[in-house]
Image: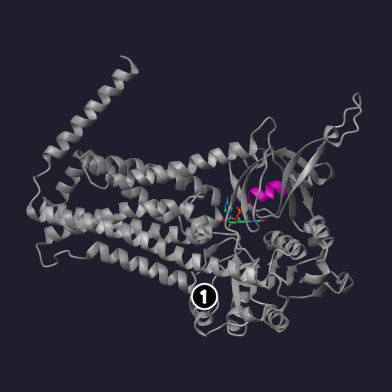
Amino acid sequence: MSTTMLGRTILALLYLFIGSVMAAAPAPTSTDVKSMEENLCYSKWAMVSIAGIIALTFAWKLVYHLQAKLRLLLCLGNERQQYWAAPKSDIFPTVKREILWAPMFAKRHNREFKLSRAMNVGTLPTRFQGLFLLAFLAVNIAFCTLSIDWSAKRSVVLKQVRNRTGIMSTINMVPLFVLAGRNNPLIGFLRISFDTYNLIHRWLGRIVVLEALAHGIAFSINKVENGGGLAALGTTLKTSYSLQMGFIALLAFIVILLHSPSIFRHAFYETFLTVHIILVALMLGTLWFHLNLSGEAWVPYLKATIALWAADRAIRLIRIFYRNVSTKMARATVEALAGDAVRVTVTMPRPWKFQPGQHAYLYMPTVGLWTSHPFTVAWSECREVIKFDNKELSLHRQDIFTKEKPTMSFIIRRRTGFTDTLYKKAVSSPDKLFSTIAFAEGPYGTCHSLDSYGTAVLIAGGVGITHQVPYIQRLVEGYRDGTVATRSVTLVWIIQSPEHLEWIRPWMTSILALEKRRDVLKIMLFVTKPKSTKEIRSPSSTVQMFPGKPNIGTLLDMEIENKAGTMAVAVCGSGSLSDDVRAAVRLRSHKANIDFFEEAFSW
Ligand SMILES: Cc1cc2nc3c(=O)[nH]c(=O)nc-3n(C[C@H](O)[C@H](O)[C@H](O)COP(=O)(O)OP(=O)(O)OC[C@H]3O[C@@H](n4cnc5c(N)ncnc54)[C@H](O)[C@@H]3O)c2cc1C
């Protein structure tokens, strides 16, 4: 039998099977029809609510963006930028302090709850994130319960609850999958970072599983109570293919819920990811049969979910091939540095442009097989590759230099998995340096433009400096060229040892050599564990070194005292540093026109 014939026969059998299942189903009653209409109506409202949230967020971001553009234009030739220096009313500073930047309770947001060094129990959402998640939960509870006639017969109520929870679980999968994707279009559209979406993804996932569980429980109770007891439930499960598929999907959902808590995710990230993907594929496949065999009207939502997932994976593959594969493949040079870190420089075969704050996923098959890890692009430049031919001596520059090769550099701090292997391989290589095939996937992440801020205070802890270096370069170059409103950039970098300065030395040398740099850039280095006081040396009045940790509040007060225009405070470092900076900025939200940006290297 040819494969086409075989395919047709299987399809015909499948249709016969679906037909028989549907024919076996009892004819719908008028209550069923009414409830179906209501379900359709609620499903539409659920989609409208999601679209409404996106539209509102977009409007808010658009106003914010336009205001920043206007400020930039008006401040270009203005030194003090007095008009923009202080908040115009108490409302916005209060909203920022009490809702937008506020931690859930007193101070803690990014600092993880830890049972031990390796056991990370997770972080608390911010107050705004918490309110959003609560509202989302409330809307879901409403959609699962509204207009159900709770006074009706128990079997009717259970059936309606079963339908509504099943529908909401299926519909919610569309945003659930969009938010998990690296290529989530909402990241660029709404300028909200991946880790915020990832947080919503995790909570939405919990809601989806609870709804699926409620769906299964409502069905089972109904079957046991009204269909002939536990034995009848067992028989239905044995005979109904659709139910078997639904049951497996539910089991997959439950295992996904159980294996996803922060403690497992952080301790065994790669295992978590692989198991997660396998379970999600199993859940989607079995749900597909469950919905199709029951002739459900919600299949399009599932199709959309699968299409979105497939599209994200396909775009990732295309990106990897486009960026890295050409006549020459991308290659990485890995150099071990003091302070448990490596500098990775990837030479790309094709042009690559990235914005400050963006990251790329690095694949190094010789070190981490197929796994990919996110790292912030700390520096990027174009190198001219020398092609010198002895036989044909040329006087023309273009004959000696071939095309420019873009390079991207990362500083990677050693942890316990891929980064540990990478570091050990570099340390044991001759000259503590090796070269290997690499693939970079990106650029990902949003760039928060700081161009319209008169004063920028950039705070970094340890390897968090990779996030701040591109901003410093952009702002100092912008100041030199007169394209930004920035009149003062202060970098506060907290490191354990002066050895860590080596991580960014070549790039800082370039930045420090920029014209007019002294007029705009001030660097304050805080060394928390110096071996001796002799190590603490300040090379100049604009590059100063101090022992110990900074007092963030005092630093901000000094900056506010001398600020020009609106002030941006950006932090990237450990969770506790972020929380300290957040607390200090909140306390000063009424003293200056401040905006707060934070970047965490985890999700
Ligand atoms: C947007 C972003 C930018 C980052 N930029 C940098 C940077 O510039 N320099 C730097 O040193 N580190 C950076 N990190 C952190 C870096 O990705 C992790 O330290 C690295 O992936 C750990 O790999 P590992 O196998 O050694 O981890 P492990 O020691 O196994 O785990 C350490 C931690 O890293 C997390 N992690 C492990 N693998 C991944 C992964 N594939 N994706 C996400 N998290 C993972 C784990 O959950 C755990 O919390 C960044 C992280 C993010 C999310």
What type of secondary structure mainly makes up the magenta span? helix
Q: Position of residue 600 (x, y in %)?
A: 60, 63
Find disc 1 in the rendering and name its residue.
Answer: 103
Which of 330 and 476 lies nearest the eye of the viewer? 476
Say whether residue 579 is visible: no
Q: Is residue 310 above or below residue 414?
A: above
Q: Position of residue 165 (x, y in %)?
A: 26, 57
Q: Where, quadrant-wise, is the N terminus in this rendering?
A: top left
Q: Residue at x 59, y 73 (%)?
A: 595
Q: Residue at x 36, y 69 (%)?
A: 135
Q: Residue at x 47, y 61 (%)?
A: 199
User: Which coloring applies here?
Assistant: one colour
Q: Residue at x 73, y 62 (%)?
A: 478
Say if the magenta span includes residue 109: no
Which of 330 and 562 lies nearest the eye of the viewer? 562
Q: Quadrant for ligand 1?
A: bottom right
Which of 110 and 543 lies nearest the eye of the viewer? 543
Q: Is residue 357 above or below residue 3?
A: below
Q: What element does badge 1 sit on?
A: loop
State yes or no: Cβ of the residue under disc 1 lies below 8 Å from any atom of ligand 1. Answer: no
Q: Is residue 323 above or below residue 159?
A: above
Q: Is residue 236 left or right of residue 600?
A: left
Task: Name the kind of residue labelled 1 in the image.
Answer: Pro
Q: Position of residue 144 (x, y in %)?
A: 25, 62
Which residues fall within the magenta stretch?
416-423
Say whether residue 365 is visible: yes
Q: Residue furthest top?
A: 1
- Badge 1 crowding class, 10 Å Cα cut-off, few under 14, some 14 to 19, many 20 or more, is many
Q: Where, quadrant-wise, is the C terminus in this rendering?
A: bottom right
Place residue 587 in its image quadrant.
bottom right
Instruction: Give the tally of numbered discs.
Output: 1
